Image: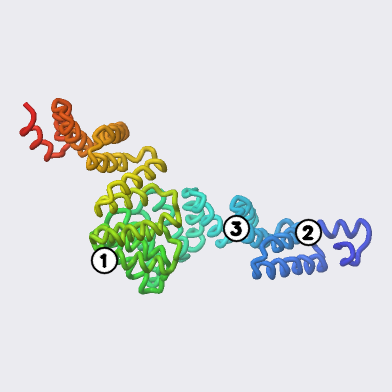
Amino acid sequence: MIVLTINLTGCSLIQAIFNGNTEEESNLIDIFILEGDEYYEAENYIDAITEYDKALKINKDKPDIYYKRGLAKKFLGNKYEAIKDFTRTLELDDSNINAYIERGKINLELNYYEKTISDCNKILEIDPYFLSAYTLRADAKLNLGNPGDAIDDCNIAVSLDSSYAMAYFLRGDAYFDLEEYQNAIYDYNYAIELGSNYSQIFYNRGLSNYHISKFNEAVQDYTKAIELNINFWQAYCNRGAAKSGLGDQDGAIKDYNMAITINPNDALTFYNRGRSKIATGDTNGAISDYSASIELNPNYASAYIDRGYAKYKLQDYEGAIFDLDKAISIDSTNALTFYNRGVTKFDQGDIESACKDWVIAFNLGYNKAEDKVQEHCN
């Protein structure tokens, strides 16, 4: 097809194509790029890549084509191939800020946080006012467990643009990680006032409200998150926890039911539903949920502890001790487990073993165990 569109013959034609110095060739490249762009705009990324490939066969040294092809590959989910194209873009043009940003975003998704930070640093060397580089770097620092450094980046972004909602959102996340929940709520509020209206920000604010026992506010936030994303199973699960905190166990169970319908593979949801069921007197239902939780996470010590308590209520002392033994084998620092096992053994008539467990519980900091020792042990 190239031969027919260029008015040259023989060796001269081949040499012209590979030298990349003819007007006809340039026009042909432009046509392929234009067609690729049209496919890209129509979200037909496969055909877009095909057209960009055609252009690169003529000229392999045009950075913008690699960048466009990288974007198309990104939207197809071909993250590693996209990174290769963005990297090639930067080899040909190391000032292409958009290529750094796109490569940094994908590295963030792939948990290559240091690489994301490196790309952001390069951007800020080129343009220290490029806002999204600060928030992208802050996101990477958060994922590396450095919320203080993330706050520093968000502060710079806010100082450059006080209406930059993403900076407030990420700074809220950083404060949350620092357990400064009121500060987190303040930043989430500001981000929402600036127009952020997506499920994650309401969900995160709900988590913050829950941690400071503002259960009504948490329920409202989780409800808004669910309105924006009907399949947000974590929001159902956490709204259930907030309703449980308000004493609405039936409402909590309904939310846990919905969360399990969407995602039946989360051990915490079954565990939480079990706690609500036992609060309503459904001990057998609670045991069933604790068992499902353990099946999903065999090292879930809390589920063993609570199932042991439920079995104790049914006077299944052997079953209770089995679960408490298992919980202790997973975590031997939980004083309540020893205390509960001591109570169970005492009700079995094994006072000596009960006293040993109560002493351990007391030494681990459970002061209530001292009363048992003084009352029943020599």
* Secondary structure under the numbered disc 2 in the rendered image: helix
Q: CA distance from mark 2 to mark 3?
A: 23 Å
Question: N-terminal of the two: label 1 or label 3?
Answer: 3
Q: CA distance from mark 1 to mark 3?
A: 41 Å
Question: N-terminal of the two: label 1 or label 2?
Answer: 2
Give how far across and how far down residue 26 sits, in percent. 78, 66
Residue of label 1: 216
The answer to which image quadrant residue 374 occupies is top left
Residue of label 3: 74
Identify the residue at the far right of this view.
10
Answer above or below: position of 259 versus 371: below
Badge nearest the viewer, 1 or 2? 1
Give how far across and how far down residue 352 sits, in percent. 14, 25
The answer to which image quadrant residue 191 occupies is bottom left
* Secondary structure under the numbered disc 3 in the rendered image: helix
Give how far across and how far down residue 148 sits, in percent. 33, 54
Identify residue type, mark 3. Answer: Lys
Residue 338 as seen in the image, left or right of residue 36: left
Q: Please name whichever residue, 96 or 196, is drawn nearer the observer in this view of the structure.
A: 196
The residue drawn where x is 32% and y is 42% is 303
Residue of label 2: 58
Residue 186 seen? yes
- Quarter of the image containing the N terminus? bottom right
The residue drawn where x is 41% and y is 69% is 227
- Local packing at callout 2 (Cα closer than 10 Å; few below 14, some 14-19, many 20+) is some
Identify residue type, mark 2. Answer: Ile
